[in-house]
Amino acid sequence: MEKVKIAILGFGNVGTGVWKILLENKKEIMKRSNYEIEVTKILVKDINKKRDIAVAPGILTNNIDDIINDESIKIVVELIGGCSEAKDYMIRAMKSKKHIVTANKLAIANWSKELFKIADTENVLFYYEASVAGGIPIIREINESLTANRIEQIVGIINGTTNYILSKMTLDGSSFDEALKEAQDKGYAEADPTSDVDGYDAVYKLAIMSSLAFGTEVDHDCIYREGIRNISAVDIEYAKKFGYTIKLLAIAKEINNKLELRVHPTLIPSTHPMANVNDVYNSIMIKGNAVGELMLYGKGAGDLPTGSAVVGDIISILRNNIKPVDLTETSCTVEFKEVKKARENESEFYIRLDFKDKEGVLGDTANIFGENNVSIVSITQDVERGDHSSLAFITHKSEEKNIRNSLNKIIQLDSVNNVESIIRIESFN
Ligand code: HSE
């Protein structure tokens, strides 16, 4: 069987996962790809670092030129992660006629146009399945399996760290800080958790999925973003009372040729299957105009799940016989689609006010909502300490600007102390 030499850039969690899969599933991979894969070089920062995995001498290098200048290496697997160094290495590798597999969502979300163009010019393949939702084969699903459809919407739990935190808060009654600490202790959250808890990671992943699904270039800066830091135990309890569970959702919808793109904490019906996606698991629901609704569920991170996506991409390249091929899969055919401003988006809302329990407050509040075309579905009130009470509302579907206009007036009522929470609801209609 013909041998193919590949190089891996980065030997952290995912890199070692790829190594383990190539070893463990060697026979199956040979059968399916028709090649024997040999990892000849692995780029690391420190060659002498103590590692759990024994690698033959000479494989580890800290010099990228050892890989770029080696003509026998046909595929470069980039697993360094989100930095311009990774982008630079991928470009140099493509210019040396090497195919690329990457898990780098930051690089794809920021520089896909440039990277795909170089792949096109150099006639090499560029695969990035592992950049979104780890082991869930979502890129291939959109690019291959669903090409007969017009995609109408994608709704997903695509960040495992925040899903772990929210699951802990919902199921165990932990506070945000306790759940975050636990996620950090288990290695699910970084010491600086900003990228996950403030929603950036999900925004990058949503930008990649929606560009492919809607055939347009999505600038991740155009995606509305809200993280989970302000979610409190009180809101989780109210959500339960109303029959909802709080999840960080990434939502992309095409409505009248305009895109609605947002990442934010969301109340979803507790009876929906996505409400039971817990721990670090991810799930993505796609609605196509022919297929209807599809739901994928699996591990969105981790050495073997993400490694599974990476090795799958390597095999795809090998199945193309590593010869120059038509690059329809990586070339972007783009059509401009406008992204709606957040104020124009429509959804149902959960709103919680802190108020002084006086006569007329409920009537005044309801009147202001009514004057601003916001219709209320349900209200619940809890008397708390002193002159602090909670009033929680669920609205019918409303434009976000009507909600904002209402709340700007409601906050001016003498009896209203504060607007504590505004959380959107997704009913999957
Ligand atoms: N930090 C990400 C998550 C994993 O929690 O889902 C890699 O994208």
Image (cartoon, helix red, strand yellow):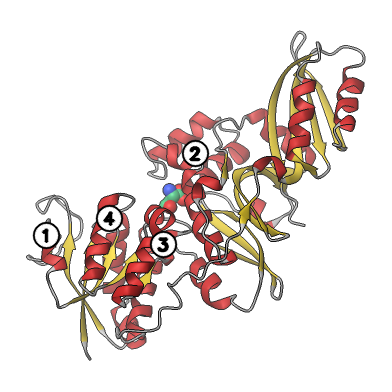
**Number of the label disc, if any, that sits on residue 197:** 2
Q: CA distance from mark 1 to mark 2?
A: 35 Å
Q: Is tag 1's residue or tag 2's residue first in the polypeptide sequence?
A: 1
Residue situated in front as seen by the camera: 421 or 238? 421
Under mark 1, the amino acid is Thr
> Is any part of residue 307 visible from this angle?
no
Name the residue that disc number 1 marks: 61
Residue with the mark numbered 3:
113
Which of the two residues, 10 or 213, is positioned nearer the viewer here? 213
In x, y percent, where is residue 224?
Answer: 58, 43
The amino acid marked with disc number 4 is Ala
Q: Position of residue 218 (x, y in %)?
A: 52, 56
Mark 4 or mark 3, which is nearer the start of the sequence? Answer: 4
**Sequence-first disc among 1 and 4:** 1
In the rendered image, the quadrant that contains the N terminus is bottom left
Q: Nearer the viewer, residue 232 or 174?
A: 232
**SS at mark 3?**
helix
Nearer the viewer's eye, disc 3 or disc 4?
3
